[in-house]
Image: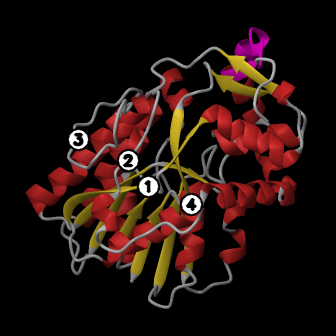
């Protein structure tokens, strides 16, 4: 297998690359990342000693350079993580999401369209394309109803992958995963943000009433699911939902983090909700489970391991949360925190 992994220095990409280089069937791994705010080369620097590993700093939407790279490296599998992924950032400015998530996907599809011996284009998408799920669990045949510019850009990218499979015969599959957590996650997402803030005794800005529900899966289980999809013969644009069915309200996640770190509930600050904030995500992963995949980590164990990782890797996240991150944090949460309210008395710990 000669892999091109896009978004390789991001959270899920980093975990996938590290897992891939432990596999005997990976002959070559080209890691592509532009190293914008969420792409951290420090995540991969220790892999440079592996002769199979080659890092390339490149914009995934740069059509000619991407096509040249794919041909030169004789890539036969693409695993496409590269994406702008933070909802708040998409609300502030949707243009980077159109560029990376849509134009980037189109550039990759064009690069592999007539590539000799090409085996699979695995497009890593999100449960957010379904929008808020009031009841039941979203299945792959549900219509997409994106609520944010981020989700809309991913839904558009999904459509272009399916169109490439139908029109040009590109062997492709799409995974739509629920919320990931685990090591190396950029601290703009709820779990790493709240863990690192709690470690520093800083406020935990909880949107709305804190009862928005997310469907959590450990990144290792997600990575295993991606390898499982790659092993399946079906690659004609088929969609697979990936979920561990761990539905937990954000307030409960927050309380578990505080309890694990022995921090007071007074750190929680209820802040103004984000526009278009989906109330509940829940995925039906029956299609993938029917092929033999199962998640292995419980949310309790996975969260405990994740909290311990951030406690042990302060140097990593302290560097990430410096400089431009502080400016972003002030833009996203500064005014919200100044008008926030305390957690209700007697809140769960």
Residue at the image point whose x is 68% and y is 83% from the top: 49
Q: Earlier along the polypeptide chain: callout 1 or callout 4?
A: 4
Q: Which mark is residue 283?
A: 2
Quadrant in which residue 153 is drawn: top left
Q: Is residue 122 visible?
A: yes
Q: Earlier along the polypeptide chain: callout 1 or callout 2?
A: 1
Q: Earlier along the polypeptide chain: callout 2 or callout 3?
A: 3
Q: Which mark is residue 219?
A: 4
Q: Is residue 181 above or below residue 4?
A: above
Say if mark 2 contacts mark 3, CB within 8 Å.
Answer: no
Give, as a single range, the part of the protein colored magenta: 332-343
Q: Which mark is residue 243?
A: 1
Residue 226 pos. (x, y %):
41, 67
Mark 2 falls on what kind of element?
loop
The answer to which of 223 and 77 lies nearer the viewer is 223
Q: CA distance from mark 1 to mark 3?
A: 16 Å
Q: Earlier along the polypeptide chain: callout 1 or callout 3?
A: 3
Q: How are the colours assigned in the image?
A: secondary structure
Relative to 43, is 67 on the left or the right? Answer: left
Q: Is residue 71 visible?
A: no
Q: Earlier along the polypeptide chain: callout 3 or callout 4?
A: 3
Label 3: few (<14), some or many (≥20) within 10 Å? few
What residue sits right under mark 3 in the picture?
142
Q: CA distance from mark 1 to mark 4?
A: 11 Å
Residue 56 pos. (x, y %):
54, 65
Mark 4 falls on what kind of element?
helix
């Amino acid at each position: 297998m000669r892999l091109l992994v896009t978004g390789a220095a991001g959270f899920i990409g980093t975990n996938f690359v590290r897992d891939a280089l432990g596999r005997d069937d990976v002959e070559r791994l080209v890691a592509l990342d532009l190293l914008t705010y969420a792409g951290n080369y420090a995540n991969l620097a220790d892999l440079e000693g592996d002769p199979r590993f080659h890092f390339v700093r490149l914009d995934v939407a740069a059509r000619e350079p991407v096509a040249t790279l794919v041909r030169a490296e004789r890539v036969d599998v693409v695993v496409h993580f590269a994406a702008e992924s933070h909802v708040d950032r998409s609300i502030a400015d949707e243009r980077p999401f159109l560029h990376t998530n849509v134009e980037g996907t189109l550039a990759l599809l064009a690069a592999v369209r007539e590539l000799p011996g090409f085996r699979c284009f695995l497009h890593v998408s999100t449960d957010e394309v379904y929008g808020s799920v009031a009841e039941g669990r979203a299945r792959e045949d549900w219509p997409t109803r994106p609520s944010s510019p981020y989700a809309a850009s991913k839904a558009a990218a999904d459509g272009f992958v399916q169109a490439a499979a139908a029109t040009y015969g590109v062997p492709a599959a799409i995974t739509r995963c629920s919320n990931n957590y685990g090591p190396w996650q950029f601290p703009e997402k709820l779990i790493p943000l709240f863990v690192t803030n709690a470690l520093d005794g800083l406020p935990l800005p909880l949107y709305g009433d804190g009862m928005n529900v997310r469907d959590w899966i450990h990144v290792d289980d997600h990575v295993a699911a991606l390898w499982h999809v790659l092993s399946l013969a079906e690659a004609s644009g088929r969609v697979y939902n990936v979920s561990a069915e761990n539905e937990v309200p954000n307030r409960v996640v927050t309380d578990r983090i505080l309890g694990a770190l022995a921090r007071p509930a007074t750190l929680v600050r209820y802040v103004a909700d984000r526009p278009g904030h989906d109330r509940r995500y829940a995925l039906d992963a029956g299609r993938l489970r029917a092929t033999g995949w199962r998640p292995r980590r419980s949310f309790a164990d996975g969260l405990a391991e994740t909290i311990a990782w951030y406690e042990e890797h302060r140097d990593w996240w302290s560097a990430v949360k410096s400089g431009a991150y502080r400016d972003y944090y002030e833009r996203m949460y500064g005014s919200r925190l100044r008008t926030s309210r305390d957690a209700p008395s007697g809140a769960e710990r």
